[in-house]
Image (cartoon, rainbow, N blue to C red):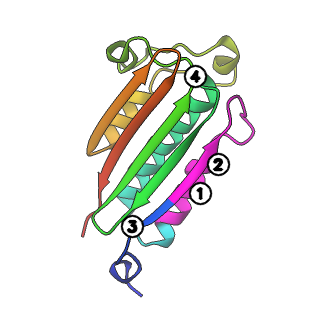
């Protein structure tokens, strides 16, 4: 069975992300990577989606009070949506700058919070949208075109 045969319709996967759970952090991104490989998606696309998923997942673990990641896979593209509840982002333009981080000392001691998450998601995606409301949470959407 070819990738095209497996991808003749859409598929949706949803992953719940727990705030502060560093033990499970990265699990959703790993599952997404495994699924895309099983579907025969181009390795370069799998790598870009995996990086974006990991960065979004870690941002939720570090900064939010929880959220979800939803992946929509269709024959032409992979659409990645992340939605969390939490403090929101006060200044999105500043948050998009490489190296800017509001991570806690605890997260930094664990090796996270380098300020590369949002910039990496944008670099990896073909289309990127982020919206945030202070005191409510953040939503982002990234689209990755599938090579044919």
Q: Nearer the viewer, residue 47 or 76?
A: 76
The answer to whether residue 27 is magenta is yes
Please name the residue that numbered disc 1 is placed on: 31
Observer-side mark, 4 or 2, equals 4
* CA gap, disc 3 and disc 2: 19 Å
Which of the marked residues, 4 or 3, is nearer the chain's N terminus? 3
* CA gap, disc 1 and disc 2: 6 Å
* CA gap, disc 4 and disc 1: 24 Å
Q: Are marks 4 and 2 in contact (CB under 8 Å)?
A: no
Mark 3 element type: loop
Observer-side mark, 4 or 3, equals 4
The answer to whether residue 15 is magenta is yes
Kindly identify which numbered label has been placed on residue 86.
4
* CA gap, disc 4 and disc 2: 21 Å
Mark 1 element type: helix
Asked which quadrant contains residue 104, the reply is: top right
């Amino acid at each position: 069975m070819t990738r095209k045969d497996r991808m003749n319709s859409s598929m949706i996967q949803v992953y719940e992300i727990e705030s502060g759970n560093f033990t499970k952090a990265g699990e959703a991104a790993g599952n997404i990577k495994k699924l895309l490989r099983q579907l025969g998606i181009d390795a370069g696309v799998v790598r870009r989606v995996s990086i974006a998923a990991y960065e979004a997942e870690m941002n939720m673990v570090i900064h939010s009070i929880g959220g979800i990641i939803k992946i929509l896979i269709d024959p032409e593209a992979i659409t990645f949506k992340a939605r969390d509840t939490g403090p929101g982002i006060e200044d999105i333009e500043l948050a998009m700058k490489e190296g800017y981080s509001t991570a806690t000392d605890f997260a930094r001691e664990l090796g996270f919070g380098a300020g590369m998450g949002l910039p990496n998601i944008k670099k990896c995606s073909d289309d990127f949208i982020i919206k945030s409301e202070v005191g409510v949470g953040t939503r982002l959407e990234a689209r990755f075109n599938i090579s044919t």
